[in-house]
Image (spheres, grey):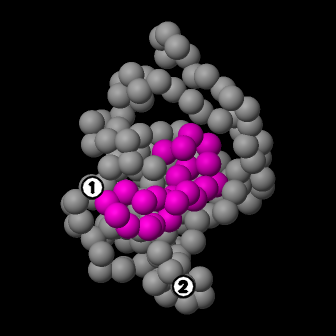
């Protein structure tokens, strides 16, 4: 692929967290070079190469503002601040995504462990992992990397319409 052309390889249905409507959007595929131009080195390492930021270093692990967490790569709506909780792990943790349509999971067996990896449905960015040790009602802990997320405050979302 040359230049900044975005290759589309089909569409996917995702939920718009602002309107609550399911929308059909183009999947986003870019070369590593294009992602590197768009992202910081840490964002690229985490989101595109399945890295992990050190615990308690991400800018959102202690964020308590009201808003929405988007995919840093493609802007897909991922998690609401209303489902964020303090897990004590050092990473932003959520009980559920804004919609199961907006994420996908895959088995991760790196480092001789069996974990469930969480990825963005629209661009396949690595977000983190989900575990079965969260609080009720879901008992899920979506343990995400701040480097894979972009936070938008509720007031800014409302202003954007």
Q: Which residue is mark 2?
A: 139
The residue furthest front is 112
Q: Which residues are magenta?
A: 102-125
Q: Position of residue 4 (x, y in %)?
A: 49, 16
Figure quadrant of residue 57:
bottom left
Which residue has dot 1 on it?
A: 53
Asked if the residue under mark 2 is in contact with the one under mark 1, i.e. CB atoms within 8 Å, the reply is no
Whether residue 87 is visible: yes
Q: Residues within 10 Å of mark 1 (few under 14, many from 20)?
A: some
Is 14 within the magenta?
no
Q: Nearer the viewer, residue 32 or 71?
A: 32
- Residue at point 22%, 60% (across, down): 54
Residue 80 horizontal/vertical position (percent): 54, 66
141 w.r.t. 159: above or below: below
SS label for mark 2: loop
Residue 127 spot, x, y in % from top left: 45, 54
Q: Residue at (47%, 75%) from the top-left corner?
A: 131
Looking at the image, residue 92 lies above or below residue 53: below
Residue 107 is one of the magenta-drawn residues: yes
Q: Kindly identify the residue that appears in the image at 57 percent across and 71 percent down.
A: 96
71 left or right of 99 in image: left
Residue 5 position in % (x across, y down): 55, 16
Alpha carbon separation for disc pair 1 and 2: 24 Å
Callout 1 secondary element: loop
Above or below for 61 versus 73? below
């Amino acid at each position: 692929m040359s230049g900044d052309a975005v290759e589309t390889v089909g569409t996917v249905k995702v939920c718009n967290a602002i309107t609550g409507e399911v929308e059909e959007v183009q999947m986003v595929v870019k070369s590593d070079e294009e992602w590197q131009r768009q992202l910081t080195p840490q964002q690229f390492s985490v989101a595109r190469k399945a890295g992990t930021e050190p615990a308690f270093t991400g800018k959102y692990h202690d964020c308590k503002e009201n808003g929405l967490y988007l995919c840093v790569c493609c802007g897909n709506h991922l998690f609401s601040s209303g489902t964020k909780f303090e897990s004590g792990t050092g990473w932003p943790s959520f009980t559920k995504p804004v919609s199961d349509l907006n994420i996908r999971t895959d088995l991760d067996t790196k480092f001789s462990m069996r974990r469930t990896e969480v990825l963005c449905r629209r661009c396949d960015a690595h977000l983190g992992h989900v575990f079965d040790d969260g609080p009720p009602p879901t008992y899920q802990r979506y343990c995400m990397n701040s480097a894979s997320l972009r936070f938008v405050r509720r007031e800014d979302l409302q202003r954007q319409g």
